[in-house]
Amino acid sequence: MGMYMVQFAYTSQAWNALARNPEDREITFRGLAEKMGAKLISLHYCFGEYDGVVLIEAPDEATVMAIVVAAVSPGHVKAAKTTVLSTVQQALNALGRAGVATYHAPQG
């Protein structure tokens, strides 16, 4: 199972609805992830370009894509960005492979 970070930004209408009727969106999102064969690790709200971050453990990118499409399709999310996360060991393995590879830059 891979780890994925999904950053999301709500529409102003979604914030208005949540302000009038606060609800724990983690419960809803956890149910969606589990239906699709994934596991919600955590959901956090934040400041900045995105309003929140979700960490998901999923078997593949297609599963994550299905989750994100299902989650944004009601129209309350104006932006979403998904990032594949690597463990330290995965990064070390990649660095080791890159260290023995050769690649020539364009000659100008």
Image (cartoon, grey):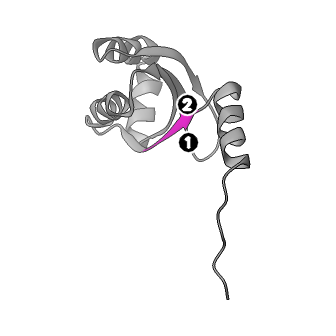
**Disc sitting over residue 66 in the figure:** none
Residue at position x 26%, y 34% in the image: 74
Between 21 and 8, the residue placed more toward the observer is 8
**Looking at the rendering, which quadrant does residue 22 occupy?**
top left
Does the magenta segment cover residue 32? Answer: no
User: Vertically, is 88 above or below 73?
Assistant: above
Q: Which residue is mark 2?
A: 53
Which secondary structure, mark 1? Answer: loop
Q: Position of residue 71 (x, y in %)?
A: 33, 30
Is disc 2 surrounded by few (<14), some (14 to 19) or many (20+) residues within 10 Å?
some
Q: In this rendering, would 30 be left or right of 97?
A: left
Q: Position of residue 73 (x, y in %)?
A: 26, 37
Q: In this rendering, would 23 be left or right of 67?
A: right
Residue at position x 39%, y 18% in the image: 29
CB within 8 Å, label 2 to label 1: yes
The quarter of the picture where the C terminus appears is: bottom right
**Mark 2 to mark 1: distance in Å?**
8 Å
Which residues lie in the magenta part? 80-85
Residue 24 visible at all: no
User: Vertically, is 74 above or below 36?
Assistant: below
Residue at position x 49%, y 24% in the image: 2
The three-letter code of the residue at mark 1 reads Tyr
Between 90 and 55, the residue placed more toward the observer is 90
**Disc sitting over residue 50 in the figure:** 1
Q: Count how many numbered circles sit on residues in the image.
A: 2
